[in-house]
Amino acid sequence: MDLCDEPAFFRLHDPLQRLATHRAAHDQGYYAITRKTNIKDAVEAVGVPHTEVGAILVKERYVSFSYIPNPGDRILVLEEIEPLNPLRPSLLRPEPLASLRFLVDENIFALGILLRAMNCDVVQAREIIKYTGENYIDQDTRIAQFVLENGMFVLSKDRNLLKRNAITHGRLVRSAYTDDQCVEIIRLLGLNKPKAYCSRCLRCNTRLESVDKAQILHRLEPKTILYYYDFVQCPECLRIYWKGSHYEALKKRMNSIFAYAQKRVIRS
Ligand SMILES: [Zn+2]
């Protein structure tokens, strides 16, 4: 008996079913597997990247992505449970990340800026492409290679990027608006509100350092010289920061994002 004669079936738990792009293919909640393939490829064939899967259950036993379904199997595919911890090993992801570093795709660039404002370690996809000078078409391959070499958590709206084997940890970002995306990631990873914002350069991610006002006077506007005394500078790109109206607006925005993220989520 093989899978042609008796298929295996898998069912996506509700939150994952909402991500499926091949809805018409499923029968009463089950998708048939009619050829020999591992469960990762079977789930991704209906549009759900493996990064979104938290556990796979076959006959009350948890299995890994390399599991090859047998004829007649009934398989349940579950979503990640929030908050997830990518620094701990799991059956599906035996190699944890050494630290939480984000790779943020081009399609959600503005989220990368907010994560940097929260002091997260962020590489923007466009920075890698810019750095290597590679052809735009080869962007996904370059990102996957960079993630493999550096062990990063990938945030993207591109399903095909997240299906790559080189990307073990990541999130298909659901929300449309930047602030909502930020709430989504804070909840997903249980991120804490920092004591102070903007310890990293928003432009290049480098940690900022104090700088003597006298050394940078020639680069400041007259009003800035008059009203502000404390400055920090990026040692890499030399951008100067101070706690002016832009900082206050960003602080207010971030505070309201954290306040919203920390509200108890009531699921219907
Ligand atoms: Zn910088």
Image (tube, rainbow, N blue to C red):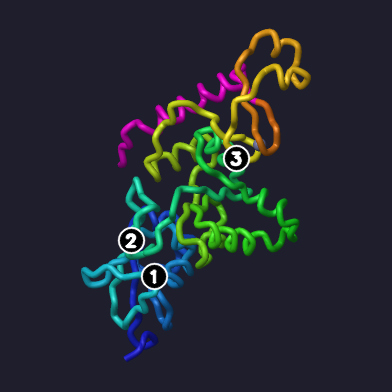
Residue type at mark 3 is Asn
In the image, which is nearer the foreground, mark 1 or mark 3?
3
Q: Is mark 3 within 8 Å of ligand 1?
A: yes
Residue 100, horizontal then vertical, whole percent: 46, 48
Q: Which residue is mark 3?
A: 205
| Label 2 residue SS | loop
The quadrant where ligand 1 appears is: top right
Give the magenta-colored segment's residue range: 241-268
Residue type at mark 2 is Ser
Marked residue nearer the N-terminal end (3 or 2): 2
On screen, 187 above or below 242?
Answer: below
The local crowd at label 1, few if under 14, some if 14 to 19, many if 20 or more residues have their Cα within 10 Å, is: some
Quadrant where the N terminus is found in the figure: bottom left
Quadrant where the C terminus is found in the figure: top left
Residue 29, by quadrant, is bottom left
On screen, 72 above or below 159?
Answer: below
Residue 51, horizontal then vertical, whole percent: 44, 59
Residue type at mark 1 is Phe
Q: Is residue 258 magenta?
A: yes
Q: Is residue 89 magenta?
A: no
Label 1 – label 3 distance at C-alpha: 34 Å
Q: Judge from the rendering whether residue 181 lies leftward or rightward of residue 9; answer left or right.
A: right
Residue 170 or residue 22, whichever sits in front: 170
In the image, which is nearer the foreground, mark 1 or mark 2?
2
**Residue at image location 47% in from the left, 67% down from the top:** 44
Residue 65 disc label: 1
Label 1 – label 2 distance at C-alpha: 12 Å
Residue 90 disc label: 2
